[in-house]
Amino acid sequence: MWEAIAGILVGLLVVYLVLLIALWLYARRHPESVSVPEALRLLPDLIRVIRRMAADKSAPPAVKIKLALLLVYLLSPVDLVPDFIPIIGQADDVIILALVLRSVIRSAGVELLHRHWPGTATGLSIIEKLAGTEPRSTQRNDDN
C-alpha cells in the first residue's frame, strides 16, 4: 500500500515539474508579451472583466466555465508555482491568465472582452496584447 502511495506522490511531483518546465519555456519563448508588473497593475480591472464576461448570458457555457475557473484560481491563495520561486513564481498567474483569455477570445470573440472592459483604453490594449490578439485602436466604446 505504501508503495502505491509513494508511486502516486512521485507521479504528481513529475507532473508538477513538467508544468513548471512548460511555464518556464512559455515565458522564455514570449519575451515580447506583457511584463509581470504591467499585468499586476491591471489585476482589479481583470477580475472585474472576468466576472462580467462569465456572467454574460450571451457567452457560451464552455467560456463561462473557463472564466469561472480562472477567477477561482486568481483569487485563490494557492498558486501553481509558489511566489518565492524567482521569476516563474510571479509569472505563473500572468501566463495562465494569458492562455485562458486567448482561449476565451478564440471561442467567444474579442467583442465579449470589449463589451465588458471596465478600465482604460490603454489597459484594454495591454490585455489584448497579453491575450495574443491584435489591439484595436485606442478608442473604445464607453457605454458599458
Image: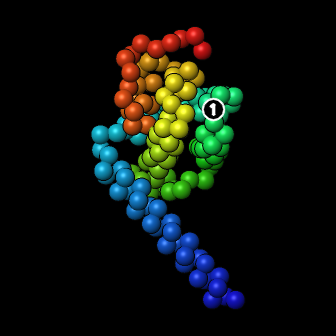
> On the image, numbered disc 1 is attached to which residue?
59
* In-image side of 43 versus 60 (left or right): left
Residue 44 seen in this snapshot: no
Residue 134: give x, y in percent of width and height.
Answer: 36, 29
* In-image side of 11 versus 127 (left or right): right
Q: Nearer the viewer, residue 5 or 133?
A: 133
How many discs mark residues in the rendered view? 1
Q: Residue at x 52, y 72 (%)?
A: 13
Residue 103: give x, y in percent of width and height.
Answer: 50, 42
* In-image side of 5 versus 108 (left or right): right
Mark 1 neighbour density, 10 Å: few (under 14) some (14–19) many (20 or more): some
Q: Residue at x 55, y 76 (%)?
A: 11
Residue 89: give x, y in percent of width and height.
Answer: 46, 53
**The disc labelled 1 sits on which kind of residue?**
Ala
Q: Residue at x 60, y 15 (%)?
A: 144
Residue 121 seen in this snapshot: yes
State the residue lying farthest toward the top.
143
> Helix, strand, or loop for circle 1?
loop
